[in-house]
Amino acid sequence: MEGRECGEKGGQLAARYIASKFQEWRLGPAFEERTYIQDFIAEHSKVEENLALKLKAGKIIRDFYYGEDWHVWNFSGSDNFTTEVAFVGYGIHAPQKRSDDYAGVDLKGKPALLVMGIPPLLEDKLKEEAEMQQRIKAAQEVGAREVLFCSNPAQRTPIPWRLKKEIYKPDFVILYDDDKIGNFIFKEVKLPAANRGPS
């Protein structure tokens, strides 16, 4: 039956086959609509083959491989581009609390490189703004076309796997790395201090 992936032809054929068997066995429908078929929304993501990520830091160019060096986050869109990456520290956008990593950074059409975690002294003050969902939303609002989260060797932070679907934009990419990308960039490029205002 061509496989049974949700929403695909094979899945629909399988559902109708099962319903026909229920009728044959004289099992009554379970739903108020008096049908054997129940519609529901299933979240689905598909990562294409042969994904490529090439970075240049200083004079060195390096290829990074999907599944080994970096991953796509759920509710990521897709895009194909070559452009400069903008480093924005932790990616905290809280000007009302005098803390803004985006201040003075031109992110229009660029990927934003963010460090996971948050300085321990600011955890209470910026707890809401430090949530991954809020960081991504902030990057979208200032015009970034992608966020790439890199790990902080000095502060290991568990990766919060689930994002809310409201963050999804078809052409906005959300990636995270397994140390290699961050180590490569921070080793080869002298990055400016995060653009954080006084605490």
Image (cartoon, rainbow, N blue to C red):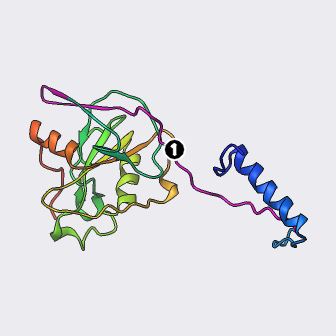
Q: Nearer the viewer, residue 146 or 51?
A: 51
Q: Nearer the viewer, residue 180 or 95?
A: 180
Query: Going 51% across and 41% down the picture, which residue do you hit?
Result: 170
Q: Nearer the viewer, residue 34 or 58?
A: 34
Query: Going 63% across and 50% down the picture, which residue do you hit?
Result: 5
Q: Quadrant of residue 36?
A: bottom right
Task: Give the class, few, some or many, for how many residues have Cα within 10 Å of label 1's Cα (few <14, many ≥20).
Answer: few
Residue designated by label 1: 46
Instruction: Answer whether residue 51 is magenta in the image.
Output: yes
Q: Nearer the viewer, residue 163 or 29?
A: 29
Query: Going 22% across and 42% down the picture, which residue do you hit?
Result: 181
Identify the image quadrant of the C terminus.
bottom left
Q: Is residue 87 left or right of residue 174?
A: left
Q: Is residue 42 above or below residue 112?
A: below
Residue extending furthest front? 25
Q: What type of secondary structure mainly makes up the magenta span?
A: loop
Q: Is residue 140 left or right of residue 180?
A: right
User: How far across and down, in percent of the image, does residue 35 sit?
Assistant: 85, 65
Identify the amino acid type marked 1: Lys
Q: How many marks?
A: 1
Q: Is residue 119 above or below residue 80?
A: below
User: How far across and down, in percent of the image, does residue 105 sit?
Assistant: 25, 41
Q: Is residue 5 above or below residue 37?
A: above
User: How far across and down, in percent of the image, does residue 150 sit?
Assistant: 24, 50
Say what secondary structure mark 1 lies in: loop
User: How far across and down, in percent of the image, does residue 96 sit?
Assistant: 30, 62
Give the residues drawn in magenta, as a range: 34-61
Query: Going 65% across and 52% down the picture, which residue do you hit?
Result: 6
Q: Is residue 116 above or below residue 186?
A: below
Q: Quadrant of residue 130?
A: bottom left
